[in-house]
Amino acid sequence: MNFVCNFPFFSILLSLFSGTICSVLPAKAAKIVNRVVIVVVGLLSATLLLYLISVGEPFIYWMGHFPAPWGNEIRAGILEAGMALFFCIIMYLSMAGGAHKLFDEVDESKHNLYYILVNLLLSSLLALVYTNDMFTAYVFVEINTISACGLIMIRQVGRTIEAAVRYMIMSLLGSGLLLFGLCIMYDLTGHLLMSNIKESVALLVASGEYQIPLIVSVALMCVGLCIKSALFPFHAWLPDAYGYSTVSSAAILSSLVSKGYIFLLIKIIYRVIGFNIFNNTRIIDVLFVFGLMGMIFGSTSAIRENDVRRMIAFSSVAQIGYIYMGFGMGTQAGMVASVYHILSHAATKSLLFIAAIGLTEVSGGSRKLVDLTGSGYRNKWAGVAFTAGSLSMVGIPLFSGFISKLLFAQAAVQVEGKMLASLIVLGISTILNAIYFMKTVIRLYTATGNSPYRGITFGKMKRYAITLIFFILLNILLGVSSQPIVDLIEQGLAMFS
């Protein structure tokens, strides 16, 4: 086996043990360890991605070199390595963009705890991406849940504690349903490895045995992951969790945590159930309907919000709806559009949260839209970044959001019976996106005369401004270089099968 095949295992282990190391380090040292680990894991993921592109096939890594069922398995393909690399990029930029606010939001004595949680979150995301074992996936789902909950409540204000409790209740409900579905699946197949489960499921379907328990198992796992990823109507926990946590936490939670659960669902669809078998169930129709509803209700809720961060949070509900609409189409084109939207939404939503904090800083700390009037002049870099993110969410060409909506539209016209509903809701959602994002951008650049708030220059916030520039460039890169990325997604999904 080529040495590079060890990189997924190294990445998970490095992230996991760095959390332990940070527990005995002072805050500054823990911060350095956190940044170094993210960079190293990103480099390992990039190297692995190049290797997989060159060989053109995935590989299986046996933990401890013991084959199943005695050992655990890691599986890496183009999609897994690419997603791991992208997660590292977004996490690094999110941490860098909110670093200047950490001292205001978190007591200094808890800074090393904050970095412990971030490292554990990274390890759990990598494990969800790479694991080929369903029980291992469940274990790291729980680690992900605990880490995310800690990142919400570490700010220690009344609303964050309430948000963390709501998040934990809903997330544990989702985890419980996932575990229940997994137990039924294990009882039916006798396996925990994804590839072995898929073989047994195919035999069960061919024989016609245990069809109802099989569908119940799949439905429970899907509902559990839908709850954890905040698909409408299971999104009640999301606005407070994203709106009142630290700025870096909000960027990471909105961009990465829910995407880790969605990526696990994609693996279940392809490598546990089988794409064709899953599409023959009525579950995809349920996902399709709730995806469409999420696109509308998430946007209408965002329009009614007067708090900029809660508005961005409600927008995530709509964007999650896009992804599940793609799943519900039941086609390869729909899945490609959904995977691409995972990348687009992660790059855009973290940009918006990071930019929003710069606008509130020059508005007396207020997050109310009325107080943000003219803030685009007071913090020019944050204003430009928020505008770029808004244009992407609306779907303006040059930005990644335009490609996402184009891919969804192209996928919709290939689906008889779902084309009209998809295109109509896609159009309505785009109009609603334009209403609340463009309304906010206009307010940012509405002159207020003599503002009581002081402006900010590039020199004072150099690192923050550079982070925003990288976010904007990443978004544009996804928009103008979409075809190579789409090709890699298609290759990665083919490897899944």
Image (cartoon, rainbow, N blue to C red):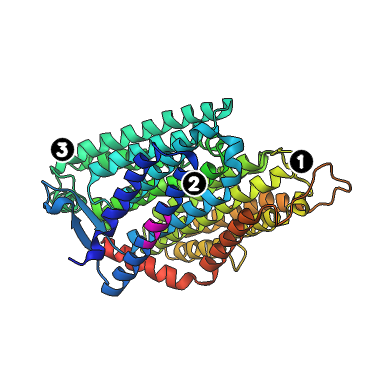
| Mark 2–mark 1 distance (CA, rounded to whole Å) | 26 Å
At horizontal 20% and vertical 57% (from top left) the residue drawn is 61
Q: Residue at x 61, y 36 (%)?
A: 104
Question: Would you say the residues marked 3 and 2 are in contact, meaning their CB atoms lie under 8 Å apart?
Answer: no
Highlighted range, magenta:
38-43
- The numbered mark at residue 102 is none
Q: Give me the disc on residue 252.
A: 2
- Of tags 3 and 1, the one toward the viewer is 1
Report the Cα–Cα distance between label 3 and label 2.
36 Å
Secondary element under disc 3, as helix, strand or loop, is helix
Q: Are marks 2 and 1 in contact (CB under 8 Å)?
A: no
- Is 67 inside the magenta-drawn segment? no
**Residue 284 in view, yes or no:** yes
Q: How many marks?
A: 3
Are the residues at dot 3 and dot 1 in contact (C-beta closer than 8 Å)?
no
**Residue where numbered disc 1 is placed:** 371
Q: Secondary structure at mark 2?
A: helix
Question: Camera-side residue: 75 or 295?
Answer: 75
